[in-house]
Image (cartoon, grey):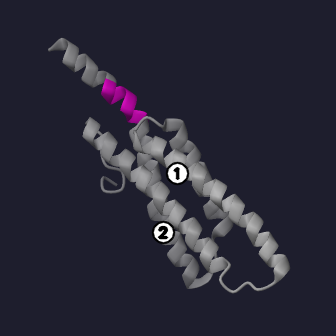
């Protein structure tokens, strides 16, 4: 369990795990783009094209929100942003999971990304405690 959820004892650990959460946000964006590309590769119907345009706008908005949340998580102080990013990720996982071998590959990617996001939530929780401890330590010296 130590490899999956490393101990957080210093500010370096907090920032390393928070950066991992920001990277997980970027991986999440890549998964969304791959899903959009692979899901719309062979579409030729004009009605379906109009639907895809609306879906593309929704994807652009979703990617912008995820980029903002990933930036906040990467700073180490975005606890609420980390929770919102994880909620978006869980919703995407529940709605985009496919069956078969292709689905297993997606589930492995979702598991790894979700684990990075959980560690980022832990890091954001510890940010306040470790930074206040560092301030107390500096004022005592």
Q: Mostly what secondary structure, the magenta segment? A: helix
Q: Quadrant of residue 75?
A: top left
Rendered image: mark on residue 67: 1
Depth check: give the residue in front, 139 or 119: 139
Q: Is residue 104 in view from this perspective?
A: yes
Residue 126: say if magenta: yes
- x 81%, y 77%: residue: 48
Compared to residue 48, the image places residue 137 above or below, namely: above
Q: Quadrant of residue 60?
A: bottom right
- x 58%, y 66%: residue: 32
Quadrant (top left/top right/bottom left/bottom right) for the C terminus:
top left
Sooner in the amino-acid sequence: mark 1 or mark 2 = 1
Q: Provide the residue span drawn in magenta.
A: 125-131
Query: Position of 33 compared to 72: left or right?
Result: right
Q: Give the crowd class for mark 1: few <14, some 14-19, many >=20 residues within 10 Å.
A: some
Rendered image: mark on residue 50: none
Compared to residue 49, the image places residue 141 above or below, namely: above
Q: Is residue 9 in view from this perspective?
A: no
Can you name the residue that lies furthest to the right here?
A: 47
Quadrant (top left/top right/bottom left/bottom right) for the N terminus:
bottom left
Q: Which residue is mark 2?
A: 109
Q: Quadrant of residue 122?
A: top left
- In what element is the residue under mark 1? helix
Q: Position of residue 4 (x, y in %)?
A: 36, 56
- x 39%, y 41%: residue: 123
Q: Give the crowd class for mark 2: few <14, some 14-19, many >=20 residues within 10 Å.
A: some
- In what element is the residue under mark 2? helix
């Amino acid at each position: 369990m130590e490899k999956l959820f490393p101990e957080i004892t210093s500010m370096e650990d907090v920032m390393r795990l928070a950066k991992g959460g920001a990277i997980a946000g970027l991986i999440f964006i890549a998964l969304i783009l791959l899903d959009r590309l692979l899901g719309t590769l062979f579409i030729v119907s004009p009605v379906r094209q109009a639907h895809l345009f609306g879906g593309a706008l929704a994807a652009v908005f979703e990617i912008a929100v995820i980029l903002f949340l990933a930036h906040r998580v990467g700073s180490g102080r975005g606890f609420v942003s980390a929770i919102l990013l994880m909620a978006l990720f869980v919703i995407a996982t529940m709605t985009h999971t496919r069956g078969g071998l292709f689905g297993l590959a997606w589930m492995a990617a979702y598991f790894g990304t979700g684990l990075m996001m959980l560690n980022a939530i832990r890091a954001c929780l510890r940010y306040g405690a470790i930074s206040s401890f560092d301030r107390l330590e500096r004022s005592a010296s």
